[in-house]
């Protein structure tokens, strides 16, 4: 940002991002990440961590080692962002602050290599690619059927998870006023797949897609209920020190959205607009993370009121230069570096991504440099360092 006499004023990270989201040119292009997974975190902080170690954290919760995980989340997030010169601290990604409540249930038993089953018959598998454990079979959810009556009552205000709140408060207090902080909220409506937002594990997508066709009246009732439920949850989840929420429900796959734009407009547009308006009324920005090809939904992104679109996926046909040209005056953009290049490419591939994004998306503000998703498991450390170095070289306005 240029001050009196044409002097380029040095901004704080928070001011830099705020200026960018107002479609003005700050002192330099901000940089941030949706998430940095544990293998990269460990290289930066120099020791093992539970931060974004999703499988490791889940097993620790199963075994009752909640304090161990909580201590790591609290200390390592702060250490990571003290060692990295990023402008954004994101506390909405998984395994960064939320501590699963203790349970009286026995831990799932191991049934095969990388496979577990709990007392309810749910089956969990570990993925070598993502280093995560996910539910791949949920017989309880598969048998559950929804009706309009399930959503006829008024939702109750949830109780705050105090252990998680302590981590959130400690981290935000460390960076408030300095960094731009994305924190949690009561949730995002997104696309409601019956069950997925209401406790269903493996197999929710297929069941939810069928319900959109066969039970639209139930989907509408569930969506209305979800808006009320999330509005209440905001009261115990949003921290007074945060600047934005970053919502991460994906809307699409590589070739297209999960549902047609017409169906999205009919069933979910107004509900998402209401949630964004509610967050805006609290003085917070709304940043939308959504992988996949969202080209046909971008006009709705603007109408909904998202302030910024993050995770612009080039391998799904979402070219940041094209999006800047079509929507960059109405929707700030955060991305530019293909996660695939961070994982499988060379430092020069990453530097070329940075140079191209800077050339087309930097002018006029409204651009934050980052990966097309996150610094995901398997990202090469040298590639990430090349990204940071090229940003420093080209960031100044």
Image (cartoon, rainbow, N blue to C red):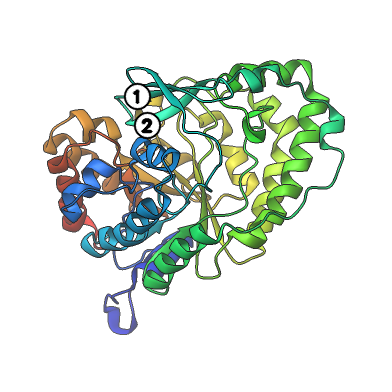
Mark 1 falls on what kind of element? strand
x and y, in percent, of residue 226 in the image: 72, 42
User: Which residue is identified by label 1?
Assistant: 127
What numbered label is drawn on residue 86?
none
The percent position of residue 200, horizontal first and vertical second, equals 62, 28
Q: Residue 132 has which mark?
A: 2
Return the x and y of residue 352 as percentages of the image width and height.
Answer: 18, 39
7 over 318 or under it: above or below: below
- Of the residues under marks 1 and 2, which one precedes in the sequence? 1
Q: Which of 389 and 58 is in front in this view?
A: 58
Image quarter in which the C terminus is found: bottom left
Residue nearest the viewer, comparing 324 with 46: 46
Q: In which quarter of the image is the N terminus?
A: bottom left
Q: Are circles 1 and 2 on residues that touch, CB within 8 Å?
A: yes
Image quarter of residue 251: top right
Residue at image x 58%, y 54%? 185
User: Depth check: 189 or 296 in front?
Assistant: 189
**Alpha-carbon distance for marks 1 and 2?**
6 Å
């Amino acid at each position: 940002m240029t001050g009196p006499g044409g002097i380029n004023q040095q901004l704080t990270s928070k001011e830099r991002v705020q200026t960018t989201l107002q479609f003005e040119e700050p002192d330099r292009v901000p940089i941030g990440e949706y998430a940095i997974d544990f293998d990269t975190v460990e290289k930066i902080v120099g020791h093992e961590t539970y931060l974004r170690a999703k499988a490791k954290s889940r097993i620790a919760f199963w075994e009752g080692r909640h304090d161990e995980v909580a201590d790591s989340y609290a200390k390592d997030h702060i250490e990571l962002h003290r060692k990295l010169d990023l402008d954004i601290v994101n506390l909405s990604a998984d395994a960064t602050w939320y501590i699963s409540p203790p349970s009286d249930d026995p831990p799932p038993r191991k049934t095969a290599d990388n496979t577990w089953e709990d007392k309810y018959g749910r089956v969990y598998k570990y993925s070598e690619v993502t280093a995560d454990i996910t539910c791949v079979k949920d017989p309880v959810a598969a048998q559950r059927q929804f009706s309009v009556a399930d959503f006829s009552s008024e939702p109750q205000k949830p109780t705050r998870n105090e252990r998680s709140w302590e981590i959130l408060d400690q981290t935000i207090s460390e960076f408030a006023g300095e960094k731009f902080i994305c924190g949690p909220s009561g949730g995002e409506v997104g696309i409601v797949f019956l069950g997925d937002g209401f406790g269903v594990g493996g197999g929710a997508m297929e069941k939810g897609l069928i319900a959109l066709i066969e039970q639209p009246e139930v989907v509408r009732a569930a969506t209305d209920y979800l808006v009320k439920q999330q509005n209440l949850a905001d009261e115990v989840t949003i921290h007074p020190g945060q600047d934005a929420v970053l919502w991460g429900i994906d809307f699409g796959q590589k070739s297209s959205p999960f549902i047609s734009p017409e169906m999205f407009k009919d069933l979910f547009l107004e509900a998402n607009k209401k949630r964004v308006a509610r967050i805006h009324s609290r003085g917070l920005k709304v940043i939308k993370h959504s992988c996949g090809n969202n080209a046909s939904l971008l006009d709705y992104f603007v109408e909904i009121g998202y302030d910024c679109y993050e995770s612009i996926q080039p391998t799904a046909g979402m070219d940041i230069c094209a999006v800047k040209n079509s929507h960059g005056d109405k929707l700030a953009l955060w991305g530019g570096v293909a996660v695939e290049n961070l994982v499988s490419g060379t430092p020069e591939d990453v530097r070329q991504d940075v140079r191209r994004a800077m050339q087309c998306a930097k002018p006029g503000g409204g651009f934050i440099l980052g990966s097309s998703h996150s610094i995901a498991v398997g990202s090469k450390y040298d590639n990430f360092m090349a990204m940071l170095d090229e940003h420093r070289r080209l960031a100044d306005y």
